[in-house]
Amino acid sequence: MRCGAGIDARMVDELAINIDPIQAGGRLTADAMKAVIAYGDGYSVCDNCRTPNRLDYISKPPIAQFHKDLAAWLNMDAARVVPGARRGFQAVAHTYVNKGDPVLLSSLAHYTEFLAIEAAGGVAREIPANAQNIVTADAAAEKIEEVKRGSGRLPVLLFIDHVDYQYGNVHDARGIVKVAHQYDIPVLCNGAYTVGIMPVDGKDLGADFIVGSGHKSMAAPAPSGILAATAERAQEVFRMTAITGDMTGRKFGIKEPEMMGCTLMGVTLMGMMASFPHVKERVKHVDRELERARIVHQALLSIQGTKILSEFPRKHTLTRVDTTGSFDRVAQSHKKRGFFLSGALGEKGVAGIIPGATRVWKFNTYGMTKAQAQYLAQVFVTIAQDNGLAIA
Amino acid sequence: MRCGAGIDARMVDELAINIDPIQAGGRLTADAMKAVIAYGDGYSVCDNCRTPNRLDYISKPPIAQFHKDLAAWLNMDAARVVPGARRGFQAVAHTYVNKGDPVLLSSLAHYTEFLAIEAAGGVAREIPANAQNIVTADAAAEKIEEVKRGSGRLPVLLFIDHVDYQYGNVHDARGIVKVAHQYDIPVLCNGAYTVGIMPVDGKDLGADFIVGSGHKSMAAPAPSGILAATAERAQEVFRMTAITGDMTGRKFGIKEPEMMGCTLMGVTLMGMMASFPHVKERVKHVDRELERARIVHQALLSIQGTKILSEFPRKHTLTRVDTTGSFDRVAQSHKKRGFFLSGALGEKGVAGIIPGATRVWKFNTYGMTKAQAQYLAQVFVTIAQDNGLAIA
């Protein structure tokens, strides 16, 4: 099937069990798909934009209410939608970071946090994860002291990934916030893998900012995300425009420079809003998701030589696995080399693994039914057996 | 019809002739709608992302080719997609503008250009439009000299709206670029109302940057837009990341800080790509669009007391009209006050006018059939007659 312009219709999630590590939480709900169809046109949410003209004041569709609900759900004071979590990082970094300022983030931080720091002119300083690939409050405290000793200055901002993209490990965001606040360092908690996947309570974490990703974890189209803030920080990052035209004297009302005015004026926001009731419900059922992930983990661990590099017990369904001692051994002599694994998975209806990867790779079981998890578990074992690997 | 979460299905363009000034060029094509349905899921374009990992290198769907085609079509050297034209302004302003730097834009500039300057710490200086609401090269030259005299410094960047959002007038972008380049000032030509609506030739204009809006003028979902640059300027705005992790030594390849890495990873880009062949074709038929607009203009001008404030002859279908001497006179004594006009239009199947507006308002006939234009013309005249206004 084609969509014109040489574009084939994408049917990955219709035809296969998709274990892509970044796509699992961004699949649309049926309601989001309806909203996408109804609000596909550019500027589709602006029909009833009235004074004051800003996206988060539109009441039909209920965008204003969504913003309130979003902030309340995260137990934060204010929220905005942004074109991806990265645009939330950018807004916060741009507000607090000046040229040469040290900024903390973890050794497992997402690259977009680095880019936000770089764009703002800051200097990235990493808090090292420990041997278990967990970022602790002690490590944060040590790094703050190290930066202070080395540069004579305190970091102006700290990013902590609530769950990181490499291991899917849960880090001590609450403890790190506590430490940072002792030095008056504001903290952005990157919930790209948690907001929409598991409960996130901003006040409990103590974070100044919570960032979430619509297309990664809130069953929304791309690019979309959210930036939530405490009342105090909201005044800083969501400050209103003060610029005027020198000839016309024009002013620009309540528009916010860090948001560049309105942000998601159509399909992306409507998809996120339509999924929101489902997302609020699904975060209550992390246990069910982890139980299904466990079925797959047990199968993988039964294949001799396979290791799971993520923390155990798993608290998130994104998992990093090391098959250097199993599937990669097969790849050494297989006529398809490393492509045998993705090929065999594809033949059995499993998509989402990088073709050729047989050493360290990631997958995500989020959203699977139990039957799908059992099937996937069996597929891994069968591929191992078919290729002469021992099963424990 | 509902999409869940209290969201009614939007049917404005299905049920009415929509003359909203900002929505006309952003209605999806049928191919875009197919692409939106196929690529609604978050991160839907990332299935085949391979090293080097960047959106504009993905070959399936043909995103890499689209970027090349886009640059060629605009006769520029490089192009990127961005979450709205404003994010193009932001990237360029952030690259060239430091705190206190004067930046030129026109007295008819869009507010997002002001916000981009404000966010970068610059000082906005307006080039005044002339009595005909046209921004000329002479006015630009005078303003450059005025800024130079006043501050002892030259502006570091100049924004010119190819067609402005207030009158839909075509400004002398080519002449202004010529003047600015005599002072080595880079120029961003804001084509939010032209790229996708009429032919835009970057080399002919001489602009350093061309910005376009997907949701405003390229039949694409929101938020989407494009930023095209000359080879020289591309190296500056699309510079690659240089930041590293101090503990891990991590580097981030070819990611671009001003783009925050990848930009439109799903439905927005695919909608834009699917519409692109249609958009390329439609820009060749501006005359047809203007002919249809003319039918409506003539009808409006036949209503005694009505003025069209946009330049004549019209070169763009976005038009600013003054009905203070006609429909607003009716409003003075009508029981519905100013709401009689939008109400009467609504009853006759016309949407997109701000409810209550009877003095100065804007509309856009872009994309109408001739029959629709004739119908709309008749509707205006009928409403005028029904309310006792004289028709010339």
Image: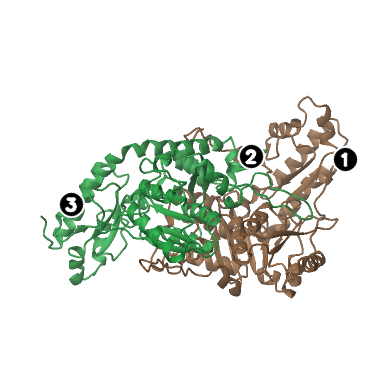
Chain colours: A green, B brown
Is disc 3 surrounded by few (<14), some (14 to 19) or many (20+) residues within 10 Å? many
Q: Which residue is mark 3?
A: A299
Q: Nearer the viewer, mark 3 or mark 1?
A: 3
Is residue B88 depicted above or below A184 in this figure?
below
Three-letter amino acid code of the residue under disc 3: Ala
Q: Nearer the viewer, mark 1 or mark 2?
A: 2
Q: Which secondary structure lies at badge 3?
A: helix
Q: Is residue B350 visible?
A: yes
Q: Is residue A9 visible?
A: no
Q: Which residue is mark 2?
A: A49
Q: Which residue is mark 1?
A: B305
Three-letter amino acid code of the residue under disc 2: Cys
Residue A259 placed where, x, y %? 57, 50
- Kindly identify which chain the residue marked by label 1 belongs to: B
Q: CA distance from mark 3 to mark 2?
A: 53 Å
Q: Nearer the viewer, residue B189 or A44?
A: B189
Q: Earlier in the sequence, mark 3 or mark 2?
A: 2
For the point 66% across and 50% down, the residue is B367
Rendered image: mark on residue A144: none
